[in-house]
Amino acid sequence: MVKDGYKFAAAPLLLGAMAIAFHWNWLGGVLIFLGLFVIYFFRDPEREPPADPDTIVSPADGHVMLVVEESLGGVAGRRISVFLSVFDVHVNRSPVEGKITAIEYQTGKFYAAMRGKASAENEQNAFHVSTVHGDVVFKQIAGWVARRILCWKSVGDTVVRGERIGMIRFGSRMDIWLPERAKILVRPGQRVAAGSSVLARWK
């Protein structure tokens, strides 16, 4: 479990136990349920990326929302958007191996993460990673519920596929932009797991 989960879960669990001790069973039950849900939300299971080094894995757990043609900096490519519900694991992972050349934080709106304009207008944190195949960009995007983006990496760090890079608290979205030389292997509606599900493969 992510260590932040302990501090968020401690208060409702303690208050719930106290409420039950005073025979406020209904309130105690609600508080204990809330504390247990927080522990569940901050879970951080181990993941094993595929052995094939040319595969690109999902940066997040959730469902593929979109696969769209999109240029970035004049370079043709595609964007894959993954939506995370409050029931998904929210630890984010690097989809590729490479060096982080930039991390760009942008303040913004808090539209529902499934809305199209959330990709451009919501608060977000974008990682630019240089790989042997080309540059890849992936974003942690805050949603209507998620209003706290955590980044655990710095510019200049080297990451491997499936390595933990941060977390978004409570319902969110992640986008990944890939150049044309990457062959997309997923479709909208498909469920993916961070660090293990293959999104694409370098041609």
Image (cartoon, rainbow, N blue to C red):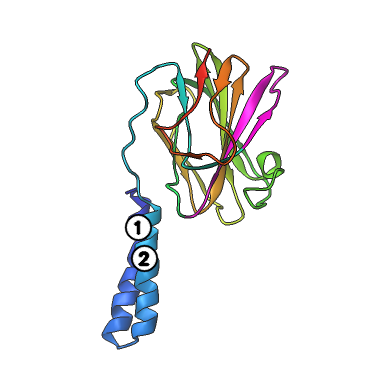
Q: Which residue is drawn at 35% across and 50% down?
A: 43
Question: For the magenta stretch, what is the residue range?
Answer: 66-86
Check residue 39 in the rendering and tell me which mark sits there, or answer none: 1
Question: Is any part of residue 17 visible from this angle?
Answer: yes
Distance from disc 1 to disc 2, alpha carbons, whole Å, reads: 6 Å
Q: Which amino acid does label 1 sit on?
A: Ile
Answer with the quarter of the image where residue 77 lies.
top right
CB under 8 Å between callouts 1 and 2?
yes
Q: Residue at x 53, y 26 (%)?
A: 185
Question: Which residue is at the front of the view, 43 or 151?
Answer: 43
Q: Which amino acid does label 2 sit on?
A: Gly
Residue 165 drawn at (x, y percent):
43, 35
Residue 85 drawn at (x, y percent):
51, 52
Query: In the picture shown, does residue 7 fall above or below 143?
Result: below
Check residue 35 in the rendering and tell me which mark sits there, or answer none: 2
Q: Is mark 2 on a helix, strand or loop?
A: helix
